[in-house]
Amino acid sequence: MTTSDSAQPAAPVKAPAKDPWELPDVSGLVVGVLGGTGPQGKGLAYRFARAGQKVILGSRAAERAQAAADELGLGIEGADNAECARRSDIVIVAVPWDGHGATLEALREDLAGKLVVDCVNPLGFDKKGAYALKPEEGSAAEQAAALLPDSRVTAAFHHLSAVLLADPAIEEIDTDVMVLGESREDTDTVQALAARIPGMRGVFAGRLRNAHQVESLVANLISVNRRYKAHAGLRVTDV
């Protein structure tokens, strides 16, 4: 047998696994917050601006958005939702569930090509407390993806206390953020954005089909908060 007959092709070299905590630099991205005059949106806008992010706060009325932005300071700008969407690199959807579908449908063109982060929790309330609703599409995030076919939809920031976000005396928000989406590049970007807030960590939690249980967990946290007079968040162990 000749040398050439016995030679075997070299096995392909397997690329090393990517470090899940190696995240991109997002400090230069403009963050828009739709529904930025509500408690959750306003709190997120404040925290990101405080961390040095450029923030545009959106509302149905530009005047209302600008008034909220002026109240927060930190270089935050106010605009109507359409302008907020157009001028931002990442757009956080923090509108009330009742107006979620109509708002996004109206902004489909303005949000085309954008990275959209849905943090809306479909909840109902009765005398027993909060309970989860299940949209026809499966979740608020999946409804957003269906309404925004030209956007890159992710889901995150569901479990944050608006009270803690808005409190200037609190330096760090001690919690993890569950991040869901279809593209690793997009979820890495959202994880990195979460990490801009001191004390916070973004943790990948699956694709959008898993968003319903993440959104629903807020009903449980509301029960925790009422019983223990707290502002509970989440921590994922062993990662």
Image (cartoon, grey):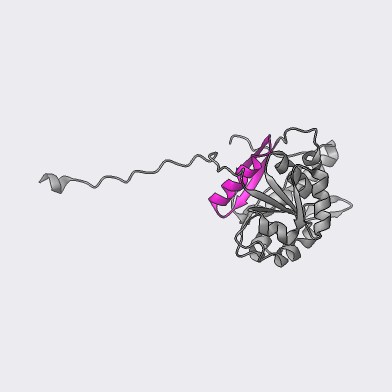
Furthest residue to the right?
Answer: 127
Q: Position of residue 98 (x, y in %)?
A: 80, 61
Q: Which of 189 and 177 lies nearest the eye of the viewer?
A: 189
Q: Is residue 76 visible?
A: yes
Q: Which of 182 and 218 lies nearest the eye of the viewer?
A: 182
Please say if 38 is above or below 101.
above
Q: Is residue 139 visible?
A: no
The image quadrant that residue 164 belongs to is top right
Considering the image in quadrants, where does the C terminus appear? top right
Q: Is residue 187 magenta?
A: yes
Q: Which residues are magenta?
A: 175-204
Q: Position of residue 14 (x, y in %)?
A: 37, 44
Q: Position of residue 125 (x, y in %)?
A: 85, 54
Q: Is residue 55 magenta?
A: no
Q: In the image, 96: left or right of 126?
A: left
Which residue is pictured at 72% across the width and 33% down the height? 172
The image quadrant that residue 142 belongs to is bottom right
